Image: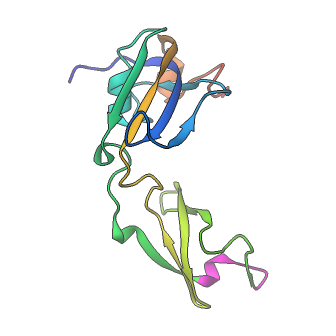
Amino acid sequence: MSEMQHKVISVDYKLTKDNEKGELIETSEGKEPLVFLSGVGHMIPTFEENVSPLNAGDSFSFGIKAADAYGVRNEEAVVSLAAEMFMKEGKLMEEVKIGATLPLQDQEGRVHPAKVMSMTDESITMDVNHPLADQDLHFTGKVVDTREATEDEVSHGHVHGPGGHDH
């Protein structure tokens, strides 16, 4: 694979399950376009490979198999945690209920959404699998804008200015 150049790419997109006619997962319609810096690993690699070579005004439509998107479901990502981790002032926090998605932090400080699967007085069982694990995805949309990334953006690993960070 050739060295990917760093570009700031803005896209209007629609993400659906399985294929173009599938159930809508998310869209930028009615919102600001999605703006990302290519070549830094923030996007699903197959998404970036399909969109990065395009120019402003180009349309795209492609599928990504689950294994190349958010991966396959891993039963080891279902964990049982001590209920006391979810206590505040001696009581279970009210947001802890079956079906709720809560942010869990790993040892490296990264936050992962985790779904509450079951609860007892002693433990809370959480599913840390990505909500779209095992799900084939389909992206359709259009490139709104593309430009070379600045040296600052590349060194910081994110977009500055409109659609990005200002620090």
Q: Which residues are magenta?
A: 83-90
- Residue situated in front as seen by the camera: 44 or 162: 44
Q: Residue at x 60, y 63 (%)?
A: 101
x and y percentages locating residue 6 in the rendered image: 41, 19
Q: Residue at x 33, y 51 (%)?
A: 71
Q: Residue at x 62, y 27 (%)?
A: 29
Quarter occupied by residue 121: bottom right
x and y percentages locating residue 35 in the rendered image: 55, 24
Tell me: 91 left or right of 74. right
- Residue situated in front as seen by the camera: 1 or 145: 145
Relative to 157, is 24 above or below?
A: below
Relative to 22, is 154 above or below?
A: above
x and y percentages locating residue 108 in the rendered image: 48, 57
Tell me: 24 left or right of 167. left
Tell me: 47 left or right of 148. left
Is the image coloured rainbow, by chain, by secondary structure, or in one colour? rainbow
